[in-house]
Amino acid sequence: MPTAQIEKKPRKTSGSPYPLWFFLPAGVIYGVLFLVPTFASLYFSLTRWNLFNSTFIGFENFLSFVQEPFLIKGLINTVIFAVSTALLKTIIGLALGILLTSNIRMRGLLRTIAFFPILVSTIGIGITFAVMMHPTRGIINVSLELIGIDGPGWLTDPTLALYSVAFVEVWRGVGLASVIFIAGLVSIPRDYYEAARIDGATKWQQFKRITLPLVQPATATVMILSFVYGLRSFELIWTMTKGGPGFSSDVIASVIYKQYQAGFYGLSTAGNVILFILIAVMVMPLVAYFNRREVDL
Amino acid sequence: MTIRLNKLLLGTTAAGLIATAAAAETELTFLVDVAPDTIAVFEAIIDAFEAQNPDITVEIETRPSGGEGDNIVKTRLATGEMTDVFLYNTGSLFQAINPENFLVPITDQPYADNIIDSFLQTVTAGENVYGVPTSTAMGGGIFYNIPIYEQLGLEVPTSWEAFMANNQAIKDAGMVAVAQTYRDTWTSQLFVLSDYYNIQADVPDFAELYTMNEAKIATTPAALRGFEKLQEVYEGGFLNEDFGAATFDDGLRMLANGEAAHYPMLTFAVGAIQATYPERLNDVGFFAQPGDDADNNGLTVWMPSGLYIPQSSENQEEAHKFLAFVASVEACDIQTATIGAQGPYLIKGCTLPDEVPPAVADLLPYFQDGGQTAPALEFLSPIKGPALEQITVEVGSGIRNALDGAELYDNDVRKQAQQLGLPNW
Amino acid sequence: MKQLRPAILGCITLVVFCVIFVVPFFFIALQAVKDRQGSSLLNFSWPSETQLWQNLVDVVQARDYQLLLAYFNSTVITVFSVTGLVIFAAMVGYVLQRRPSKWNKYVNFAVLAGLMIPPAVVPTIWLLQQIGLFKTIHGMILIEIAYNLSFSILLYRAFIATVPRDLDEAARIDGAKPLQLFFRVILPLLKPVTVTNIVVQSIAIFNDFTNPLYYLPGKDNVTVQLTLYNFQSQFSTQYHLLFMNILLVTIPPLIVFIFFNKQIVEGMTAGAVKG
């Protein structure tokens, strides 16, 4: 089993082949255009702000946001959406990655097809799927009817809408996940599999002992990215259901957007801060977990 | 036209980064939302305006409509990046963009005298008037399919009871009585908003009390009726099967083709029917949303968007010229020629052609007889809660009952009132 | 028998993939050739007569050939911001992975924060105005770089770990300076992940809707996703033109993908040999 070389020996700062100023170009752009406005918005989250003028009102926005009637529901929906899409993207992405790096015919074509959904903008996908999920005329229910099933209202049934959107999100994102997995999978040296085969290891053993541990960085990347993306996700939900019917597929990001749309800028900024804290609380442990695993390897 | 084409060529070849203002010419920038009708009308008006003012060109820039568009307008006003002229709502949304700080008053301009008073009220803030009407007044009520009415021998209802009886008769005949289109959530609000004439008939000062936080929808029986009507229509089983997924376009199609008998909507929809189903235009009629009292039947009226000049404009003189042109009889005639007559104009002296579509012909009497119209609540009170369309979708789909919905909405408007800094909230 | 299995597996997969991934595109293409009434039904029926060319012309000509200008603007933004992203992110990911320093935890935190914090729109606009970058293409490029850095850094950091350190040492012994080491030795070895970065980021930026909407207003600054709004509004949607427009703005990402698709495969074989 190969192990990543972790250099323990301390290095001298001067003349390092890895100069710290390499951080600089990215750091300046990021700091000025992202961090500065973010800190400014922390102040605005404590004000009643209509863009034209702002009145300092302390934590009232946070109170008011927490009292939003559908916040709890939005919170639960956010977690359901993020967890289910992240898990499915990881599992299906890995499966597709293995399939598309295996000795399969038409590999190039298949890779191209799986990546297709990424090419279309979220808005385009949202419009298309909303139409295909139409309860009476949509292709999905029309097809189901052919085999005698009475399809549900995918986006109009309040208990189902969120899951339908999650499905589309997985459809959209799985191509990217599998590309990341493919890049990870091909960097695993073939010799290991050869050696394992000679030792008589089954396919499953090879998968468990070689593939899974060595593709770990890709797994971490896919999982963290899709989880964070899922927590922040908004565009697809907005184009497909607008958080509806009623409030049934609202997530925190859509609640925030609605406050923003209504012109409650202070309130929506406060919601942003809350969302950030929430994401940090949920993602940090995941990141720490993967970092530990990486060192263990 | 050639000028614009040249500009485009230059723009695409020379990196699009180069500003290309021609020498002795003023270019007015103009932000509008993307409804195709709006753009068609303005393109025609601009062509005529440019013909009369060869030294001015007007460049249309588009923005999304709805809430996204509201944000664009607010952001650009606040950051001083607004175009020279822009199109925006009147009434409560107009109040929310802080007109006194950002817009140029037109009170003393001669063309302001051409505008009918009922419109002026909706673009007045403090002492001053700020906007010019861009289209006709609209009614909010119920469109109906004339062939279905003839086939079943129905009469246009003047009371809610009669309306529901018609619905029952249509349902019994195996047809869809009411089209609802909740995929476009905004369309779910019509039964509630178009009921304002009936609220005002019962509680004449409701808007004032409501703004002062002294009357609530849930506790004012007349105001609650709108929500109840929405619930009754759902519970009667009158809706099209796919009401949750249908769009505004579907609603118009069902109405025009006789797939549904009624569709509650604003009368600007006549323009969309004309564009998509011109051969069915004569099959569509209109009536005001009936109240419980058949003897007091009237229409809730909406005002069109206005044209405004932001204080940040550097071409205010030319902008006034353009507004003056839009506020002229000539501009009304251009609009009629481009998309047809849709309702009464708000510019003095503008007339409608003798031949108008039946829905418009049904609309006009409410205005002529006097005393039979009331402005929609959003033109009388600055408060309109942002979640109304979600709540009306819930009430209209049986997820929530009328009283619950009204209470939730009363709660929703609180934030709006606080944001506007209204007293007593 | 041994030869047959991959072929059968390939065929089955192809059929499944077609149903799952291709049908929606077929749907888009189908709507794009209908007329307005036919497309407003939004079903799968074959149109009685197709009007592909007419719709194409209508979409391209709409608003004074706005689509062409949009193609141009979006391409400029995409090319420059992706170039910046690849270089800057690879530099950060490289040093971050190679050199343990007290800065690392701050950089890591900043990377995560960049992924997690939703950008604050209005303060950003004010800032851009202050430094004269609002409503400019280069301002937009910098914004795209700032917002997408985290994702790219994360990708690079993960894969720089797979590049053996021996190579750095060998190059240093040959007398390579840090910049030479990075650009001549490391960056070429990162080709697979760079290709992934280019493909993913260029598509995301080309398809970006919200950011240009806020930071790049102005008729001459239109980007491709904004053209979709020419045909849909709150009140009326011309679906046939909308879907034609979706189809047309999907072509550039498709070209990028087809072009780099080969590179992905090449880069991957290189990666496999290297291992």
Image (cartoon, rainbow, N blue to C red):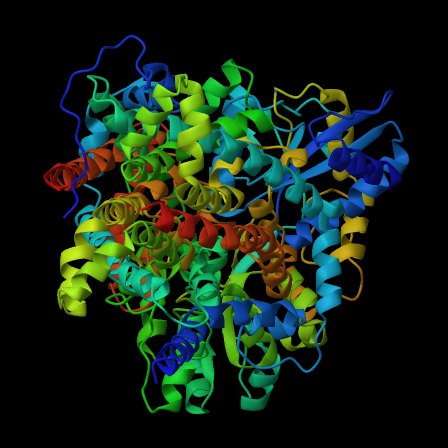
Q: Position of residue C221 (x, y in %)?
A: 63, 34
Q: Quadrant of residue B249?
A: bottom right
Where residue B421 sits, quadrant-wise, is top left
Q: A125 or C1: nearer the eye?
A: C1
The reply, left or right, for residue B200 in relation to residue B100 is: left
Q: Quadrant of the C terminus of chain B?
A: top left
In the rendered structure, the answer to whether residue A21 lies left or right of residue B99 reads: left
Is residue A88 or residue B369 the one in the foreground?
A88
* Residue A91 image offset from top left, x and y in percent: 24, 61
* Residue A165 at least partly seen: no
Q: Residue at x 37, y 49 (%)?
A: C273
Of C172 and B362, nearer the camera is C172
On the question of residue B40 being in view, the answer is: yes
| C182 vs C68: above or below | above
Residue C31 % position (x, y): 59, 70
Query: Quick check: A33 above or below C234?
Result: above
Tell which residue pokes out farthest to the top in this image: A14
